[in-house]
Image: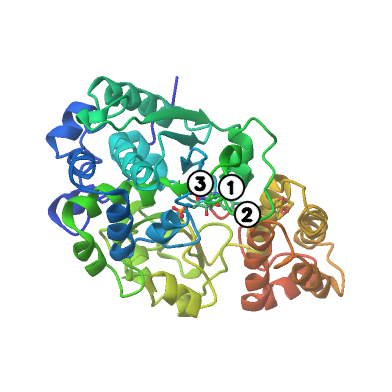
Amino acid sequence: MSFYSPVRTNAAEAASDEKLHLFTYVEDPEQHTVKRYEEHGGYTAWKKVLADMKPEEVIEKVKNSGLRGRGGAGFPTGVKWGFVPKDSPKPRYLCCNADESEPGTCKDRVLMERDPHGVIEGMAIGSYAIGCHLMFIYIRGEFGHCIDRMEQARKEAYEAGHLGKNIYGSGYDLDLIIHTGGGAYICGEETALLNSLEGEKGLSRIRPPFPAVEGLYASPTIVNNVESLAAVPHIINRGAEWYKKLGTEKSAGTKIFSLSGHVKQPGNYEVELGFSLKKLIYDEHYGGGILGDKKLKGVIPGGASTPFLTPDMIDIGLDYESLVEQSSMLGSGAIIVFHEDTCIVWVILKLIHFFRHESCGKCTPCREGTGWLEQIIRRIEAGEGRKGDLETIEDLCGNILGRTICPLGDAAVMPIQSALRLYREEWEYHIENKKCQVKSHYPFK
Ligand SMILES: Cc1cc2nc3c(=O)[nH]c(=O)nc-3n(C[C@H](O)[C@H](O)[C@H](O)COP(=O)(O)O)c2cc1C
Ligand code: SF4
């Protein structure tokens, strides 16, 4: 039996606002069927692409739209597609990254469960753009309901002629393989994902070569996030100019934010990039304010690997540039809110425990450093901190940041560095008084 996520969405708003598009139909209980998807205009973009567009025109259109990857790094999607070598004799592959393991992130899950054909259509268009005839979707193994829905959608897409041989009589063949992961966070990192798809251990690869040049089975491969690909049919249908006008100048389009933690109405909200973080947390249509009407203590804005924001920093737009200006990142768009009773040392302990556990162990700074960090932070949290511990933590973080094979090392230390900078007194209180100064160690009460 698989579990369906009853997560709150702003689909009603999306249905009446023509700028929002990813969530327009996600509350329709039949949207996951090919019949309903087609009734809502589904697969028209794929038909249009195969009938009227050359691959390079598709790439150009996606480039012009300003779409940037929604998996975390925000790299321009069309530019990435353009990196696939045109003269390579090898097959090309497209892998949709549906591993979604970043703590706090649960947006791709909703798209796959409730609008799986939208994901398949985006993947198909991306595949055509890079000359791929075999595409993969790598789904987090724990997402039983997504896997069921994607398998059903795949079957229906073949039966309806959207996938398979000579699609719509165009002469283009395209197949889809659904692959389920084994529950490792690192397998969301694109090169570890490719190793895992090949049946190897999920260890990250040293780059270069980048996957676009040498990826799956040493062939040119594009790895894209579910949300990035789901935006593509809308760009084809409504045009690059329409998409570019959404959001801000450098952060085009809409984004789904997964809002969790101490808010009254946690959920997934699709908004234009640049939308106010404060409004998302406090507005009655979104987060609805802080649980128990308590004071806000801090926010992690883009998933567990992004630096904290303090209450005076939340009056900003949710876009790639504004968050960098606040020394943080948009990441995967998972916003975790903490109220005044939260022990920041406890939060950091939970995070470093996660990253230490999920480190693939290939490089020394991450493998050893995350373990040492966890030991020291656990000691401080337990009231056994020592003088000099904070300096040792800082030194360790400095020796991990930028010195690892993949960004998991950076992800592990950036929240710690920001917590030390922004909540220093709380750490010092823990060490000096051998106890915590806030009421609860459990932030989700
Ligand atoms: C440790 C780690 C975990 C990641 N997990 C995911 C994930 O679950 N889903 C995802 O799309 N990207 C994840 N990424 C980012 C991918 O490596 C890659 O950048 C992304 O899938 C590219 O797609 P995009 O350009 O459409 O964003 C992760 C990166 C790291 C370093
Ligand atoms: S940074 Fe960590 S997860 Fe990434 S390759 Fe090194 S050991 Fe593995």
Which amino acid is tagged 2? Pro
> x and y percent of residue 278 in the render?
36, 71
Q: Is mark 1 within 8 Å of ligand 1?
A: no
Q: Which quadrant is the N terminus positioned in? A: top left
Snapshot quadrant of residue 81: bottom left
**Residue drawn at (64%, 75%) of the image:** 423
Q: Is residue 443 above or below residue 115?
A: below
> x and y percent of residue 225 in the render?
44, 48
Q: Can you name the residue that lies furthest to the right here?
A: 387
The foreground one among 33 and 385 is 33
The foreground one among 95 and 268 is 95
Do the residues under discs 1 and 2 have CB atoms within 8 angstroms?
A: yes
Indicate the secondary structure of the residue bearing disc 3.
loop
Where does label 1 land, which residue?
A: 214
Where does label 2 land, which residue?
A: 209
Where does label 3 land, which residue?
A: 88
Q: Is residue 55 left or right of residue 263?
A: left
**Residue drawn at (71%, 57%) of the image:** 405
> x and y percent of residue 311 in the render?
47, 75
| Dot 1 or dot 3, earlier in sequence | 3
Q: CA distance from mark 1 to mark 2?
A: 6 Å
Q: Is residue 433 above or below residue 441?
A: below
Which amino acid is tagged 3? Ser
Q: Is residue 296 left or right of residue 343?
A: left
Q: CA distance from mark 3 to mark 2?
A: 14 Å
Label 3 Cα crowd, 10 Å radius (few <14 / some 14-19 / many 20+): few
Q: Nearer the viewer, mark 1 or mark 3?
A: 3
**Residue drawn at (17%, 55%) of the image:** 238
Q: CA distance from mark 1 to mark 3?
A: 10 Å
| Dot 1 or dot 2, earlier in sequence | 2
